[in-house]
Image: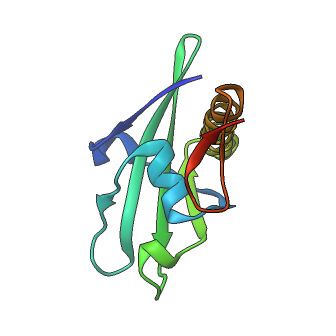
Amino acid sequence: MKYETKADFRLTNGSCLRGVINATYQEIVDAFGLPLPGDGEKVKAEWIVCFEMDDETVIATIYDWKKDAAPENNTLWNVGGFDMRCVDMVEGAIAYNIDMRYEEQERMHSWDYDSGYADSDSGQRQLF
């Protein structure tokens, strides 16, 4: 699945709320980059994401509608779009990104292990 974050609010004209996702601000930033600033009243942070599927584009918006907390402290986000697929695509992209980070951490750990080095009680690495 290919996707790109956009800054063109005209792409979302006529879209509406399609669902809510549970994700941290950092998980969304890791998947889609930094947000666009909201309107300063009802929305503080917003992403516009275009997912490329075969011969069509599915547009999704992720935003913090009427939240008192700062975006960095939010874990429930509204997802808008033109059809319900946008929610699954946003969730899928975030989950994929989390999986990739986990696999990268596992590779790093495995690399250290396979290199023959281990951390000693003194905090120094030593060959075993």
Q: Quadrant of the C terminus?
A: top right
* 32 w.r.t. 38: above or below: above
| Most foreground residue, 107 or 50 | 107
Residue extending furthest toward the bottom? 68
On screen, 50 above or below 29?
Answer: above
- Left or right for 51, reference 108: left
Using the image, determine if residue 86 lies above or below residue 37: above
Is residue 52 visible in the rendered image? The answer is: yes
54 relative position to 84: left or right = left
Q: Position of residue 121 (x, y in %)?
A: 67, 61
Q: Residue at point 44% right, 53% down?
A: 29
Name which residue lies at 60% across and 71% down: 75
Residue 20, quarter of the rendered image: bottom right
Query: At x 30% / y 48%, what residue is drawn?
Result: 9
User: Where is residue 92 shown, x and y percent of the image?
Assistant: 68, 39
- Whether residue 16 is visible to the viewer of this picture, yes or no, is no
Q: Quadrant of the N terminus?
A: top right
To which quarter of the image does residue 100 belong? Answer: top right
Taking the image as shown, residue 59 lies to the left or right of residue 10, namely right
Q: How is the image coloured?
A: rainbow
x and y percentages locating residue 110 in the rendered image:
70, 32
Q: How many marks?
A: 0
Foreground residue among 115 and 20: 115
Residue drawn 60% across the image and 62% down it: 122
Picture coordinates of residue 73, whole percent (x, y): 50, 78
Out of 114 and 72, give the one closest to the viewer: 114
